[in-house]
C-alpha cells in the first residue's frame, strides 16, 4: 500500500489520490473513526475522498465534480477557494499563531472580532449584545451556555433555577451537554442522556404535528404554548432557560409558522426565563441576516454561533452575551471558572474578521435576503408540483422537500424503505450533494450561489427526484 501520498505536497496529493482512492479508503477504514458513522458499512463501501474545491463545487479523488448544496456542513458561507481567508490565516500564523487569553492577556484579532460582532448583532427591544465568549465549536458554545445560565441564576440568588427546556428533534451539538440539549432520540439512547435538568417539548413541525384543518397561524400559537404548559408543570421558579434554533437545521429544516416566535417570546418574558437562540446554522447570512433572531422578532439573552463565522475555513464558535446576563456575570460575577485553551484563538479570529469583511464587501447577506433567497424560494415552490414532493419550503438559504408516497392523501413511505437515502444516492451519482433527514431532502447552499447556479441546482434536484421515482416504480413502491 502506498502511504507516501499522505505526506506529499497538495498538488501531488491531488494527482496521486486519483490513482490511489482504494489505498486511501483502506487507510481511512483502518485508522480513522468518523463522526456519526457505521464503520462496518464504511469498510464495505469505502469513503468518498474529497480532494479539492472551488466556489460551490467540490471534487472527489475520481475527479467527479459535485455541486455542494450543503456548504460542507452548513458552514462554507463564502464558498470555497477564498484566498483572502487563507492569507489572513497565514499572516496571523506568522505574527502570532497562538497565545492564551486566560491570565489577563489578550490578542488583537480576538478584541477586533469581539468588537465587530458586538457591532453586527442587532439591538432588539432595547437589548444589546456588547460581549462575546469564544470557543471552537457549536457544541462547546452550548456547553458554555449551560454553565453561564446556571452561574447567572446562582449569582442572582436563585440556584434552584436549573432546568433548561429544549425541543424534540433539535440539534445542539454532540458533547454531553450539547447532545442532552438536542432532542435526537438516537443520541439520547447512547450513554445515559440527557444529563439531569434538561427536558424537551415538541417541535413546531406543521406537517407532522398540526391538527386536521388547523391553520399554520393557529398551529404556531398552539406549539408555542407547549412551552408555557411545560414551564407551569415544572414550576417557573425552577426553570432557567429555553434554547432553540430559529429554524431547525439538522432536524430537517423545520421552519416554524410566523406566529410561533412572538408567542414564545411572550411566554419566556412572562416567566422571566432566559432565551438562548442557537444560531450555529442560522447566523452569518444563512437566513439573510447577520443574526437570525432579528428576522423572527426574537429577543434572546444568549446567541450561540459557530460554522459560518469563519465560513468553516477554521474552527471557531462562541456565545453572544446580551446585557441582561453580562451585567450580572461580567460586572458583578467574580471569577467564572470556565474557558477553553482556544478561547479567542488569534488565527481563528483573524480568519473570521477576513470572512466578515469579505461578506460585507460582496454584500452577501443582503443578496440572500433580497435577491437569491427569494429566488431560491420561488424555484423550490415549483418543485412542490413534482409527483414525489409533498411539501417544499425555503427560508433564506436553507430549504427542504418532503418525499411522499401519495401527494393527495399525504401518505408517507414506510421509513424502512429509506427513500431519502435512495434519493441522496441519486444526488451523488448526478453530481449533487443534498442531505437526507428521514424522507426530508434538505439544502443549505453557499451564499455566493448565483441565480444561474440556483437554476443549475434545481435542474439537478429535479433529475434526482425523477431517478428516485424510476427506482421506486422498479421495486413496485409507486404506481
Ligand atoms: N447547534 C446547532 C444548531 C448545530 O447545527 C451544533 C450546535 C454543534 O456544532 P459543532 O460545531 O459542535 O458540530 C450544530 C452542528 C447535520 C449536522 O447532519 C449538523 C451539525 C453538525 C453535524 C452534522 O446536519 N450542526
Image (cartoon, grey):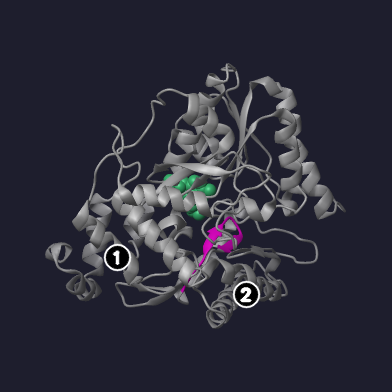
Element carrying mark 2: helix
Q: Residues within 10 Å of mark 1 (few under 14, many from 20)?
A: some
- 211 or 100: nearer the viewer: 100
Task: Specify whether residue 478 is painted magenta.
Answer: no
> Relative to residue 20, is residue 110 depicted above or below?
above
> Relative to residue 425, is residue 117 depicted above or below?
above
Q: Quadrant of residue 78?
A: bottom left
Whole-percent x, y for residue 131 in the image: 48, 41
On residue 86, which mark appears?
Answer: 1
Judge from the rendering whether residue 4 lies leftward or rightward of residue 387; answer left or right: left
Whole-percent x, y for residue 95 in the image: 21, 55
Residue 172 in sight in this render: no
Whole-percent x, y for residue 4 in the image: 12, 64
What is the span of residues highlighted in magenta in the rendered image?
432-442
Task: Specify whether residue 439 is painted magenta.
Answer: yes
Residue 223 in sight in this render: yes
Residue drawn at point x = 75 percent, y = 31 percent: 270
Judge from the rendering whether residue 351 lies leftward or rightward of residue 449; answer left or right: left
Residue drawn at point x = 42 percent, y = 26 percent: 336
In the image, farthest residue toward the right: 213
> Relative to residue 420, is residue 277 depicted above or below?
above
Quick one: quadrant of the N terminus?
A: bottom left
Residue on which disc 2 sits? 371
Residue drawn at point x = 28 percent, y = 66 percent: 87
Real-space Cα distance between discs 2 and 1?
28 Å
- 239 or 171: nearer the viewer: 239
Amino acid at each position: 500500500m502506498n502511504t507516501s501520498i499522505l505526506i506529499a505536497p497538495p498538488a501531488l496529493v491531488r494527482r496521486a489520490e486519483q490513482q490511489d482512492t482504494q489505498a486511501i479508503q483502506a487507510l481511512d477504514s483502518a485508522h480513522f473513526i468518523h463522526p456519526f458513522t457505521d464503520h462496518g458499512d464504511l469498510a464495505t463501501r469505502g469513503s468518498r475522498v474529497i480532494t479539492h474545491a472551488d466556489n460551490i463545487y467540490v471534487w472527489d479523488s475520481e475527479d467527479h465534480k459535485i455541486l455542494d448544496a450543503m456548504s460542507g456542513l452548513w458552514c462554507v458561507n463564502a464558498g470555497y477557494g477564498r484566498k483572502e481567508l487563507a492569507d489572513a490565516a497565514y499572516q496571523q500564523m506568522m505574527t502570532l499563531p497562538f497565545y492564551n487569553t486566560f491570565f489577563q492577556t489578550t490578542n488583537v484579532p480576538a478584541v477586533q472580532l469581539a468588537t465587530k460582532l458586538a457591532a453586527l448583532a442587532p439591538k432588539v427591544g432595547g437589548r444589546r449584545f456588547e460581549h462575546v465568549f469564544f470557543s471552537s465549536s457549536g457544541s462547546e458554545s452550548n456547553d458554555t451556555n449551560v454553565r453561564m445560565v446556571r452561574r447567572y441564576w446562582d449569582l442572582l440568588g436563585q440556584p434552584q433555577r436549573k432546568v433548561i427546556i429544549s425541543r424534540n428533534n433539535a440539534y445542539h451539538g454532540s458533547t454531553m451537554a450539547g447532545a442532552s440539549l438536542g432532542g435526537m432520540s438516537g443520541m439520547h439512547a447512547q450513554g445515559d442522556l440527557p444529563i439531569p435538568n434538561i427536558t424537551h417539548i415538541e417541535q413546531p413541525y406543521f406537517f407532522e404535528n398540526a391538527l386536521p384543518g388547523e391553520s399554520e397561524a393557529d398551529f404556531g400559537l398552539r406549539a408555542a404554548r407547549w412551552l408555557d404548559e411545560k414551564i407551569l408543570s415544572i414550576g417557573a421558579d425552577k426553570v432557567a432557560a429555553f434554547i432553540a434554533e430559529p429554524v431547525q437545521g439538522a432536524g430537517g429544516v423545520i421552519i416554524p409558522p410566523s406566529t410561533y416566535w412572538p408567542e414564545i417570546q411572550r411566554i419566556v418574558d412572562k416567566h422571566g426565563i432566559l432565551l438562548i437562540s442557537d444560531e450555529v446554522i442560522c447566523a452569518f447570512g444563512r437566513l439573510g441576516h447577520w443574526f437570525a433572531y432579528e428576522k423572527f422578532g426574537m429577543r434572546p439573552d444568549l446567541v450561540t454561533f459557530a460554522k459560518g463565522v469563519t465560513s468553516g475555513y477554521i474552527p471557531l464558535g462562541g456565545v453572544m452575551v446580551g446585557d441582561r446576563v453580562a451585567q450580572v456575570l461580567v460586572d458583578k460575577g467574580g471569577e467564572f471558572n470556565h474557558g477553553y485553551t482556544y478561547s479567542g484563538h488569534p488565527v481563528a479570529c483573524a480568519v473570521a474578521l477576513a470572512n466578515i469583511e469579505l461578506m460585507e464587501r460582496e454584500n452577501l447577506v443582503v443578496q440572500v435576503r433580497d435577491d437569491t433567497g427569494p429566488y431560491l424560494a420561488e424555484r423550490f415552490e415549483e418543485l412542490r408540483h413534482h409527483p414525489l414532493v409533498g411539501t417544499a419550503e425555503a427560508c433564506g438559504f436553507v430549504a427542504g422537500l418532503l418525499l411522499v408516497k401519495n401527494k393527495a392523501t399525504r401518505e408517507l413511505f414506510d421509513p424502512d424503505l429509506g427513500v431519502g437515502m435512495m434519493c441522496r444516492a441519486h444526488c451523488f451519482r448526478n453530481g449533487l450533494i443534498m442531505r437526507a433527514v428521514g424522507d426530508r431532502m434538505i439544502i443549505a447552499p453557499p451564499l455566493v450561489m448565483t441565480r444561474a447556479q440556483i437554476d443549475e441546482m434545481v435542474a439537478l434536484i429535479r433529475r434526482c427526484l425523477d431517478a428516485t421515482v424510476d427506482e421506486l416504480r422498479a421495486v413496485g413502491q409507486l404506481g
